[in-house]
């Protein structure tokens, strides 16, 4: 809804996706993105985000702590530095120098959940459908320009320093203004292995619809990891330059929101490889 306000007013897709993903980033009840995100196994909330525009400009931060809106820091990396990715302390220093406020992002509820997890401290990096969920958003504006954003607190109770697909351009997000845009959620390691979002866009370039491209990318993961793929979730979302939409996941339960001039911010459940 926030992104649509920008698009409906004739604004840039880039501003739309930034505004859109800021909503879950700032929501303390959303435990997989930004403020209120579940921490790593040391109790630290570490955030991964990236953003990409119509001219292949892109910026990202990984393992960033204490900043409510990592997507906006990623945008500053894109706009204010010659670099694409800043990580950890360096990303935090940059954010503070850019005027972002240092905050505690660990809510009482997320701390409680972590302390509960600590009792067994069972390290299960294979995320299940419930304990992970990134927000990825792609948009096409009235000037026919595309942009995308992806932001997450990553897998709950991960090793400190672990970075998934979400801040990696080509893995968690990719935009090619001639072809389309794609983003992903799920077990980041598996998405990185196939350069997932870039793969989806390149499959679209070869003539596949966004739906076919998402399906082919998920099937590539099944082919690589036939056994593991049964126990994890991966979802891809794609939008083509002409406004066609595709979504596909390994497991059931991957929902996405779509807004167009005809469809008013409706939730859809993506088809899945496994029933
Ligand atoms: N893709 C994210 C990661 O691996 C997790 C998620 O989508 O929930 O960090």
Image (cartoon, grey):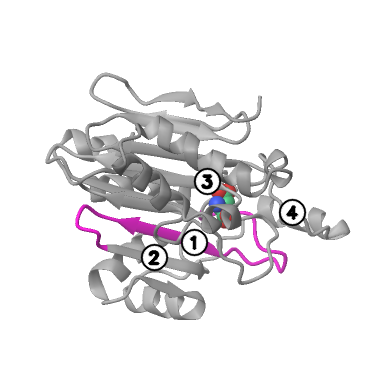
Q: Is residue 42 magenta?
A: yes
Which-is-in-front pick, marks 3 and 1?
3
Q: Which residue is mark 4?
A: 112
Ligand 1 closer than 8 Å to the CB at disc 1? yes
Q: Secondary structure at mark 1?
A: strand
* Disc number for residue 185: 3
* Dot 1 alpha-carbon crowd within 10 angstroms: few under 14, some 14 to 19, many 20 or more: many
Residue 204's x, y, as percent? 33, 40
What is the C-alpha distance between the residues marked 1 and 4?
22 Å
The answer to which of marks 4 and 2 sits earlier in the sequence is 2
Q: Secondary structure at mark 4?
A: helix
Q: Along the line of sight, which residue is nearer the eye, 203 or 178?
A: 203
Residue 271 horizontal side relative to residue 141, left or right: right
What is the C-alpha distance between the residues marked 2 and 1?
8 Å
Q: Can you name the residue that lies furthest to the top here?
A: 262
Q: Along the line of sight, which residue is nearer the eye, 23 or 153?
A: 153
What is the C-alpha distance between the residues marked 2 and 3?
16 Å
Q: Which residue is mark 1?
A: 48
């Amino acid at each position: 809804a926030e992104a649509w306000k920008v698009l409906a007013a004739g604004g840039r897709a880039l501003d739309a996706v930034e505004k859109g993903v800021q909503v879950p980033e700032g929501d303390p009840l959303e435990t997989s993105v930004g403020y209120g995100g579940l921490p790593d196994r040391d109790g630290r909330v570490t955030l991964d985000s990236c953003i990409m525009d119509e001219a292949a400009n892109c910026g990202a931060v990984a393992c960033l702590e204490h900043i409510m809106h990592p997507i906006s820091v990623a945008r500053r990396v894109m706009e204010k530095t010659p670099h694409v990715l800043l990580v950890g302390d360096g990303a935090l220093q940059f954010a503070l120098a850019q005027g972002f406020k240092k905050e505690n992002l660990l809510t009482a509820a997320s701390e409680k959940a972590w302390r509960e997890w600590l009792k067994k401290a069972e390290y299960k990096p294979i995320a299940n459908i419930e304990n992970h969920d990134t927000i990825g958003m792609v948009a096409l504006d009235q000037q026919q320009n595309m942009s995308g954003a992806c932001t997450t607190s990553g897998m709950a109770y991960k090793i400190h320093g672990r970075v998934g697909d979400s801040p990696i351009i080509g893995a968690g997000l990719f935009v090619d203004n001639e072809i389309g845009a794609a983003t992903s959620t799920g077990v980041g390691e598996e998405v990185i292995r196939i350069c997932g979002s870039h793969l989806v866009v390149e499959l679209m370039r070869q003539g596949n619809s966004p739906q076919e491209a998402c399906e082919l990318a998920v099937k590539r993961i099944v082919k690589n990891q036939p056994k593991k793929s049964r126990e994890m979730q991966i979802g891809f979302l794609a939008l083509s330059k002409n406004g066609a939409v595709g979504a596909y996941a390994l497991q059931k339960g991957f929902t996405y929101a779509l807004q167009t001039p005809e469809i008013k911010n409706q939730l859809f459940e993506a088809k899945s490889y496994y029933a």
